[in-house]
Amino acid sequence: MTQETGGFAALDLNPNIVAAVLATGYEEPSAIQQQSIPIILAGHDMIGQAQTGTGKTAAFALPILNKIDVSKREPQALILAPTRELALQVATAFETYAKQMPGVNVVAVYGGAPMGPQLRAIRNGAQIVVATPGRLCDHLRRDEKVLSTVQYLVLDEADEMLKLGFMDDLEVIFDAIPASRQTVLFSATLPSSIRSIAERHLREPKHVKIQSKTQTVTAIEQAHLMVHADQKIPAVLRLLEVEEFDALIAFVRTKQATLDLAAALEAKGYKAAALNGDIAQNQRERVIDSLKDGRLDIVVATDVAARGLDVPRITHVFNVDMPYDPESYVHRIGRTGRAGRDGRALLLVTPRERRMLQVIERVTGQKVAEARLPNAQAVLDARIKKLTSSLAPLVAEAEATHGELFDRLTTDLGCSARALAAALLRKATNGQALDLAAVEREQPLVPSFTPRGERTERGERGERPERGDRERRAPMPLAEGRVRCRTALGARDGIAAKNLLGAILNEGGLARDAIGRIQVRDSFSLVELPEDGLEKLLSKLKDTRVAGKQLKLRRYRED
Ligand code: AMP
C-alpha cells in the first residue's frame, strides 16, 4: 500500500470495502467523503451540501455498506434518486464498492421497466434498494410492507427530486419506513422546501458542507468545454492539436485514467507519462525531472501524485476529470502561470457536472468562459502552421546543402519541381491528414453541446444529437390557436410520447386532432394543446399520473 492510501484505511471502514475502493483506483477520500463517512458510521442523521462531482455517492455508499448485515436478506438501505439514470449510477457504485463483500445484493427500482422483477428482487433478499420515488410509490401501493425493514434512508439530490414534483411521493415513502431509521440527505442547494423536509424527517442532523474560501487566480486564462464522459480522450487529443503548449499537466481522478490517457497520448506521438500513487517515489521523481528538462511534455496525474510538483515549463493545465472542490481546482491550475508566465487552464465538464462549474466560478469569483472543440478546419490550420514552422529554419540553408540533389532527382524522375516537392512533403508528413476532407474523415466524432439556435460545426456533421443537445434545441414554431404546455416528466422518467398522448386523451376528453406535437426531452416534455379552454383542460388533468408520476402540466411561455 502506498502512503496516500492511508486516507481510506484511516476511515474505520471494513477492510473489504477499503480494498474494493483502492482497486477502483481511488487514492484518497475527497473532502465530502472525509467529513461524511465518520458521521454516517457513527449513526447520525446528516445533511450534506454537495453536488455531483464531489464524490458524494461514495460518501454515503461506503458507510452504508459498512452497516449492512449481509446475513439478513431483506431491504436495509433505501437510496432515493431523482432520475432513472442517477438511480442506475448509484446502484452501480454500490456494486463496485461491494465487490469484495459476497452476499450483498443491490436492486435498482425505476419507472419504464416492468414492476414484477423489481419487486421479486426486493423480496429475494436485496439489502440495498436504489429507487426513483414515483416507481417506489407504485410498489408501495402493491405491497405496503416492502420497506418495513429499512434502517438507512438516503435522499440523493433532494433538491432535484423536489423540482421534479416528488414531494408527495417522498412523504408516502417516509411514512412507510420505520421511524427509528437513520436518514441522510444530500442536496446541492438547501432551499426552504428542503430545510422543511429536514426539520420534519431528520433527527438532529449534522451538517456537512465543504467550506470554500474565495480564492484568487491571476494570470491564468481559463476556459471550459462541455463533453460527454466517454468522449474525453478524443476531446483532449483534438484540443492538443490546436493548443500551443510547452509542457502540460492533465489531471484525472483514478490511476487507471492516468494510464489510459497517457497511452492514448503516446500512441499519437506525444512524449507523455502517467503519474499516480502506484508509481514508486524514485520513478515519480524521474518523471518530474523529464518534464522539467523536456524529455517529456505531458504528464497525466492524479491530485495525490501531483502534490508538490513545480515545473516552470508548464504552460497548460487540462482538468480532464473535474476536481472535487474549488480549492483543488485552484490548486491544480496554479501549476501553470509559474514565475509570472502566462498559463492556460482548460476544464472538461460533463453534463451532470455543470453545477460544479458554477461553484468553481462562484468561489474563484471568475467566469470560466466556454470554449468549443476545434473543428476540422482549425485542426488543419494548426497542422499546416506546425509544418510551416518546422520548415522555416530549413529553407534558408537547405538549398545550399540539398539543392543539387533536388535538381538531379527532378531530372532522374522526369518530373516537375512541384511534383517532387509534393512527394517529399508526403514522405515527411508521414501519412498525416493535411486536407480538409481527410481531417474531417479522421476526426473522431466528439459530441459537444450546441448552444441554442447555433448550428453544429463542420466536422461534427452527422453526429447523433446527444441528450444535452436535445435539451437545448430551440422550440419549433406553433400552429395557430395552439399553446405549448410543459411537464417535468421526460425520457429519464421512462415517459414516451404515446404515454402522454394516452393520458391527455383519456383524462382530458380531447379529440385526437386537438393535440399537436409532443416532444419528449430528457428531463421534461412539451405538448401542444388548444388555447381555447386550456385552463379547464389543465384543471381536468390536475391529478393525472403517467408512469406512476404526477403529470403536472403547465402552460409554457417561451421568451
Ligand atoms: P459523484 O460526485 O459521487 O457523482 O462522483 C463523481 C466521480 O468521482 C465518480 O466517477 C466517482 O467514481 C469518482 N470518485 C468518487 N470518489 C473518489 C475518490 N475518492 N477518488 C477518485 N475518484 C472518486
Image (tube, helix red, strand yellow):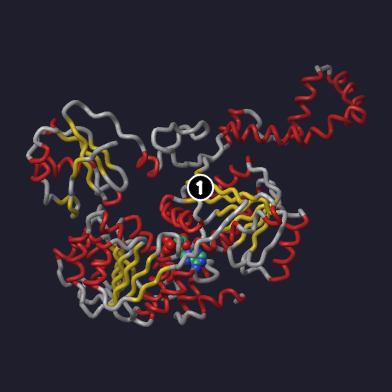
**Residue identifier under label 1:** 231
Tag count in the figure? 1
Residue 239: quadrant of the picture: top right
Q: Residue at x 87, y 23 (%)?
A: 409
Residue 414, above or below 520: above
In percent of width and height, residue 515 lies at 16, 34
Question: The disc labelled 1 sits on which kind of residue?
Answer: Gln
**46 or 466: which is nearer to us?**
46
In percent of width and height, residue 365 lies at 49, 54
Q: Residue at x 21, y 78 (%)?
A: 179
In percent of width and height, residue 240 lies at 62, 44
In percent of width and height, residue 531 lies at 14, 33
Residue 358, above or below 118: above
Residue 532: quadrant of the picture: top left
Position of 192 with respect to 481 (left or right) is right
| Secondary structure found at label 1 | helix
**521 or 147: which is nearer to us?**
521
Residue 144: quadrant of the picture: bottom left
Position of 299 with respect to 185 (left or right) is right
In the rendered image, the quadrant that contains the N terminus is bottom right
Q: Residue at x 14, y 30 (%)?
A: 513
In the rendered image, the quadrant that contains the C terminus is top left
Position of 30 with respect to 173 (left or right) is right
